[in-house]
Amino acid sequence: MKELKWKEQIKHNLIVSCQALDDEPLHSSFIMSRMALAARQGGAKGLRANSVEDIKEIKKLVDLPVIGIIKRDYKESDVFITATIKEVDELMTVEPEIIAVDATYSRRPNNETLDEFYQAIRSSYPKVALMADCSTFEEMKKADQLGFDFIGTTLVGYTKQSKGNKIEADDFSLIKKAVKELNTPIIAEGNIDTPAKTKRVLDIGVYSVVVGSAITRPQLITEKFVAATK
């Protein structure tokens, strides 16, 4: 898909995250491809997907731009989203339009710095669009300085340095600050679980918004309804 086309396609629109980990009931590349098809039929303009296998199946069925990631645990590392060049190499075999990587200050595999990792990717794949999954404003500012194509709020509240934070706190003040002070397009992601929140972050000025669990993880959706019966 031509770069100009897909960038315009996701601008000010919804991206649906279609993921299911090994221990989840919908874990299946076939099921994720059908989930992606359902998202497209519902009007989504982009997708976020985990693993080469899932992306390959999704691209067979759906012609939407994909944010590709690989989640993999590394010993003595807190980083697990596209953590090394190995995952980037694997993702490039299926050519997602964007590759998202953990761009936090968390400890990386082999004690590699984010600067070193970013330069390694740019050296091997200078044209691929890169998204920085961040958890704090300081990390977003660093990603902006490095030259990432997009910055995501994906990991706010999920790292040691952001524990207890929520991107919706104080009317999305973190997103407001990022949109106002950074040059890189911001993609809102993480705990955007209602249509009202989706509209709100788009009104603030984010480039796109990613919604995952509220659409594609039925076990978590069910838990909310069950909680209401207690």
Image (cartoon, rainbow, N blue to C red):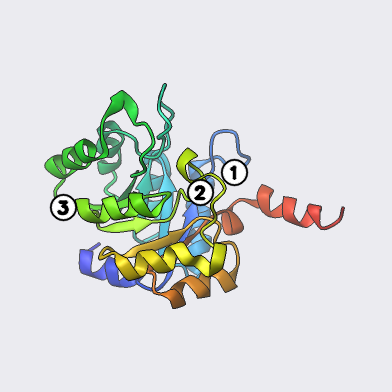
Give the mark nearest the N terminus, 3 or 2: 2
Q: Any mark on residue 174, and which?
A: none
Nearer to us in this view, 26 or 69: 69
Within 10 Å of disc 3 (Cα), the crowding (few <14, some 14-19, many 20+) is few
Residue that numbered label 1 is attached to? 26
Q: Is residue 57 visible?
A: no
Q: Residue furthest top?
A: 75
* SS label for mark 2: helix
Q: Is residue 183 above or below residue 156?
A: below
Quarter occupied by residue 185: bottom left
Q: Tell me how far mark 2 sits from mark 1, CA to CA.
A: 8 Å
Would you place residue 76 above or below residue 102 in this image? above
Labelled pair 2, 1 in contact (Cβ < 8 Å): yes
Q: Nearer the viewer, residue 73 or 36?
A: 73
- Furthest-right residue in view? 230
Q: What is the distance, in whole Å, between disc 3 and disc 2 at their CAs?
A: 27 Å
Real-space Cα separation, disc 1 to disc 3, in angstroms: 33 Å
The residue tagged 3 is 127
The secondary structure type at the circle numbered 1 is loop
Of pointers 1 and 3, the one earlier in the residue sequence: 1
Compared to residue 128, the image places residue 4 above or below, namely below
Q: Where's residue 106, x and y in %?
A: 39, 36
Q: Quadrant of residue 15?
A: bottom left
> Which mark lies nearer to you, 1 or 3?
3
Residue 10, position in %: x, y? 36, 68
Task: Tell me if I can see residue 143 in this picture.
Answer: yes
Q: Which amino acid type corresponds to the residue marked 2 in the rendered image?
A: Met
Q: Mark 2 highlights which residue? A: 32
Q: Using residue 115 as the reference point, say whether residue 82 is left or right of it.
A: right
| Picture quadrant of residue 166 | bottom right
Percent x, y of residue 25: 63, 40
